[in-house]
Image (cartoon, rainbow, N blue to C red):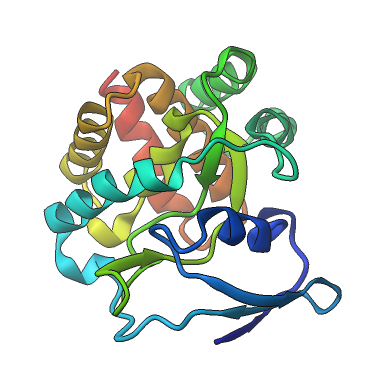
């Protein structure tokens, strides 16, 4: 499959991420042309999204998949701390969120980056429609938006994956299963999820959905 992209900070180093994974839980990169922002990718067949498997079946897959994707990483991937500073600048100037919610996001973005654990490769958009059914393996991740940072950040896109159900119960169930079964620090994972979810809600057609997700996580603290 040929993928031609518009240059964007979130998809920068997508080819390098796929090379590092080398097909371990993700589609393979067959070739690339950086000057044309073009990637030749392994094709997933039948290509059914993981969200179609049902919420708990999808979580089973994510619990098995995430540790495989969390490979030690550094350059050339953008550090999570650098991306957090970008989000912080954007959210500090925002007047679009309720005070307690924006306060929690800003607190997380100011405190968490400097105290991270081991730096691993993170797929910051790993949701229920970015894992597809394939022939080589039952499920393969696609469309990485890579960062290098601690594991606790890695559950954020799955927790807000409304493809797997959008209610307070759904969100907290995903959060509890992922943090518990992967042995993650719950409060660090909560802080990262609230912060990125609010940052990504800006200008998004899913803004209200993301804001609700962040609010439910904060209320359950």
- Disc count in the image? 0
Which quadrant is home to the N terminus? Answer: bottom right
Q: Residue furthest right?
A: 35
* Residue 165 visible in the picture: no
Q: Of residues 47 and 24, which is closer to you in this image?
A: 24
Q: Position of residue 146 (x, y in %)?
A: 60, 50
**In the rendered view, does 118 fall on the left or right side of 2?**
left
Q: Position of residue 79 (x, y in %)?
A: 68, 34
Say which residue appears at 67% left-offset and 77% top-offset. Answer: 31
* Residue 111 visible in the picture: yes
Q: Of residues 32 and 200, which is closer to you in this image?
A: 32
Which quadrant is home to the C terminus? Answer: top left
Q: Of residues 18 and 9, which is closer to you in this image?
A: 18
Q: Position of residue 89 (x, y in %)?
A: 75, 31
Say which residue appears at 27% left-offset and 31% top-offset. Answer: 182
**In the rendered view, does 5 fall on the left or right side of 19?**
right
The vertical placement of 170 against 25, above or below, is above
Q: Position of residue 129 (x, y in %)?
A: 36, 67
Residue 152's image quarter? top left
Say which residue appears at 70% left-offset and 28% top-offset. Answer: 92
Say which residue appears at 17% left-offset and 50% top-offset. Answer: 60
**In the rendered view, does 44 fall on the left or right side of 86?**
left
Residue 66's image quarter? top left
């Amino acid at each position: 499959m040929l993928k031609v992209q518009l240059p964007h900070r979130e998809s920068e180093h997508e080819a390098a991420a796929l090379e590092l994974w080398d097909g371990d839980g993700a589609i393979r990169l067959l070739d690339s042309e950086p000057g044309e922002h073009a990637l030749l990718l392994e094709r997933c067949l039948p290509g059914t999204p993981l969200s179609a498997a049902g919420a708990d079946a999808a979580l089973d897959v994510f619990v098995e998949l995430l540790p495989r994707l969390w490979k030690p990483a550094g350059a050339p991937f953008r550090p999570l701390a650098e991306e957090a500073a970008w989000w912080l600048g954007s959210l500090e100037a925002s007047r679009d969120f309720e005070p307690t919610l924006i306060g929690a996001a800003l607190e997380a973005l100011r405190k968490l980056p400097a105290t991270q654990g081991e730096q691993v490769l993170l797929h910051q958009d790993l949701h229920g429609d970015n894992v597809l059914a394939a022939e080589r393996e039952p499920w393969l991740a696609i469309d990485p938006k890579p960062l290098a940072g601690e594991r606790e950040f890695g559950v954020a896109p799955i927790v807000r994956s409304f493809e797997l159900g959008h209610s307070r119960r759904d969100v907290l169930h995903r959060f509890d299963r992922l943090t518990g079964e992967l042995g993650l620090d719950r409060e660090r994972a909560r802080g990262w999820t609230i912060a990125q979810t609010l940052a990504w809600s800006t200008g998004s057609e899913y803004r209200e959905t993301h804001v609700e997700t962040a609010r439910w996580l904060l209320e359950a603290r």
